[in-house]
Amino acid sequence: MPDLTKLTETACKKAPPYAKLWDTEIKGFALFTGKTTKTFYFQKDVKGLTQRIKIGNYPLIDAFDARVAALELATEHATGVAAKKLTAKKTPTLEEALERYLARAKLRSEHNRGMVEAQMKSHLKAWLKLPLDEITRSMCVEAHERISVVRSGKDVRGRPKQMGGQRAANHTLKTFRSVYNFALKTHELPVCPTIAIEWHPEEPPKTVIADFDLWKKSVDALENDVHRAYYRFLLFTGLRRDEAMTLRWDQVFDDHLHLPTTKNGRPFDLPLLDVHHAIIDPMRIYRSEFVFHGKRQALHLRRPAELPWSPHDHRRTFATVAEHDAGLSEGTVGHLLNHTPTSVTGRRYSATAYRHLIEPMKAVVGAFKQRDLL
């Protein structure tokens, strides 16, 4: 049985935590309490769907004003005015907003989609069914503090894994902020509640492969030849993780590879040399659409065996060798890595053809060859 009481000022003051109190006079008028919050709602079924409108938080709005607002909403329903209005203004839940956010065209990377979804479902699972306007600033601060604490857990394969930490807390709540602000474009919502968070300071990772002999031994020791080729190709091209994993044979040409869509939203052509073809040509025996094929039903490589260095560590190493060993300028290295130019001229006007990058690529490959890495 629901808890029924007349929602007077006294009743609201004495309402216990984690309660749902329904008014005895105005049907659908309720006070929901949490650990530290008390919120007035008006709830009604419209066309078979339960619609809930947040009236306000107590005591910012007192019981008298909340009753007046609830009575106005009840009158609108009684006269048939509210049905269309409520449907049009329905606030999406975090789960609904996340689904729309993941479907947007600009979120092109499959890796990014998976990462965003995993962050929400791993760290903010309890919020998924909540309407966005019910997620408060104090909830965001509490979640940020909770995720900041490193704890032991397991990955998707059941292996021990360290979870949480300051970096994970920042990234999870900033991802939530992106989802929320995307919904804000089409819904009447308050300012994103992450405004209350004190973000942890973050230094960008700068890990590179320092011991190339160890890297070569580690790669050579991998049992799967596809995984070995994948890591060698990463190091010798500087490609991003997903760009290499999803590379198709119809994107590979004699002197370059063509990526029609990349992280920054632009197509990209990268020079290919004989050394690159020597790495990937043996993969043709698998007769896959993709250069690095996957196991069983997987269309392409998804989970390469782990090394002490991440795929992005390979990309940073390519950039470091290009600048310090091959002597390339920062701008040229940026072109090889397909970084978005920072200047207006670079973003809107300047275009670098892959043929202009052949000599720089030869210089980088030459620096790697001196280390006898193949």
Image (tube, rainbow, N blue to C red):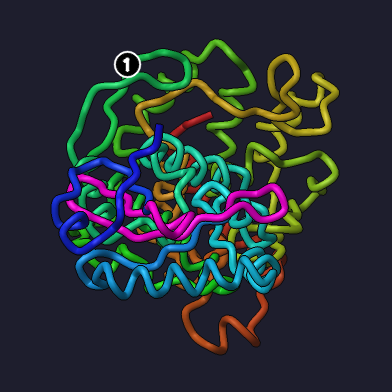
Range of the magenta residues? Answer: 24-50
Q: Is residue 148 visible?
A: yes
Q: Is residue 362 visible?
A: no
User: Number of labelled discs?
Assistant: 1
Quarter of the image holding residue 304? top right
Q: Is residue 283 left or right of residue 223?
A: right
Q: Is residue 362 above or below residue 185?
A: above
**Measuring 30% from the left and 55% from the top, which residue is drawn there?**
6
Looking at the image, which residue sits at the far front? 25
Q: Is residue 223 above or below residue 156?
A: above
**Measuring 20% from the left and 67% from the top, which residue is drawn there?**
59
In the rendering, at what x and y percent does residue 9 appear? Answer: 19, 64
**Measuring 52% from the left and 70% from the top, which residue is drawn there?**
73
Q: Is 113 part of what is drawn in magenta? A: no
In the rendering, at what x and y percent does residue 124 appear? Answer: 38, 42
Q: Is residue 329 left or right of residue 280?
A: left
Q: Which residue is mark 1?
A: 160
Residue type marked 1: Pro
In the rendering, at what x and y percent does residue 83 appear? Answer: 68, 65
- Residue situated in front as seen by the camera: 215 or 142: 142
Q: Is residue 321 above or below residue 69?
A: above
Looking at the image, which residue sits at the far top? 223
**Measuring 59% from the left and 58% from the top, which residue is drawn there?**
263
Q: Is residue 115 above or below residue 58?
A: above
**Which quarter of the figure is the C terminus placed in?**
top right
